[in-house]
């Protein structure tokens, strides 16, 4: 799968998550958590992001001042989402491509992904 962001691929994230889960304090989570626990962790991170954005909306700080915190929460979400997908035996890269293409068809967009992760205009 060719999807990368600044050199990070879904495959590399999956490999690193697998290794870190088996060799860190997360090992207890790896051994004891159910699928629901991993989803709850993901939703918790989404809640943290929502809280930051709420504070931006009410004027506590600007979006620029919050950008680093926002990026960290999005990274946490991505990490837990990958672990959740792994626990459910889902190839997140393929699932994303398939769903993106399904929605493009439904909303009459000509933007699609090839199986290798490269986008194209249909």
Image (cartoon, rainbow, N blue to C red):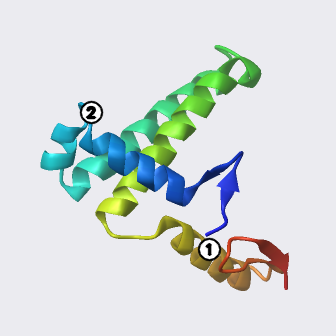
Numbered tag placed on residue 5 in the rendering? none
Which residue is label 2 attached to?
24
Expressed as whole percent of the image width and height from the top left, the position of residue 95 reads 52, 73
Left or right: 102, with 91 as reference point: right
* Picture quadrant where residue 53 is located: top right
Instruction: Give the distance between the C-alpha atoms of the residues marked 1 and 2, in whole angstroms.
Output: 32 Å
Query: Which of 63 and 34 lies nearest the eye of the viewer?
Result: 34
* Picture quadrant where residue 85 is located: bottom left
Expressed as whole percent of the image width and height from the top left, the position of residue 31 reads 14, 48
- The answer, for residue 53, to whether it is visible in the render is no
- Quarter containing the N terminus: bottom right
Q: Residue at x 52, y 33 (%)?
A: 73
* Picture quadrant where residue 10 is located: bottom right
Q: Earlier in the sequence, mark 1 or mark 2?
A: 2
Q: Residue at x 79, y 83 (%)?
A: 108
Count residues near mark 1 (Cα–Cα under 10 Å), then give few for <14, some for 14-19, many for 20+: many
- The answer, for residue 72, to whether it is visible in the render is yes
Numbered tag placed on residue 97 in the rendering? 1
Q: Residue at x 85, y 85 (%)?
A: 122
Residue at the right extreme, as displayed: 121
**Eyeballing the image, is 49 above or below 100?**
above
**Eyeballing the image, is 109 above or below 38?**
below
Residue at the top extreme, as displayed: 60
Expressed as whole percent of the image width and height from the top left, the position of residue 22 reads 25, 44
**Eyeballing the image, is 103 above or below 28?**
below
Q: Nearer the viewer, mark 1 or mark 2?
A: 2
Query: Which of 65 and 84 lies nearest the eye of the viewer?
Result: 84
Element class at badge 1:
helix
Element class at badge 2:
loop
Left or right: 37, with 31 as reference point: right
């Amino acid at each position: 799968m060719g999807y990368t962001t600044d050199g990070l691929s879904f495959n590399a994230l999956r490999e690193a998550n697998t290794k870190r889960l088996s060799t860190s304090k997360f090992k207890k989570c790896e051994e004891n958590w159910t699928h629901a626990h991993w989803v709850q962790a993901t939703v918790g991170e989404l809640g943290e992001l929502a809280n930051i954005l709420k504070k931006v909306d009410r004027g506590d700080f600007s979006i620029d001042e919050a950008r680093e915190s926002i990026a960290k929460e999005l990274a946490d979400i991505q990490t837990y989402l990958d672990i959740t997908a792994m626990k459910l035996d889902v190839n997140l890269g393929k699932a994303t491509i398939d769903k993106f293409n399904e929605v493009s068809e439904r909303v009459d967009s000509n933007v699609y992904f090839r199986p290798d992760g490269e986008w194209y205009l249909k």
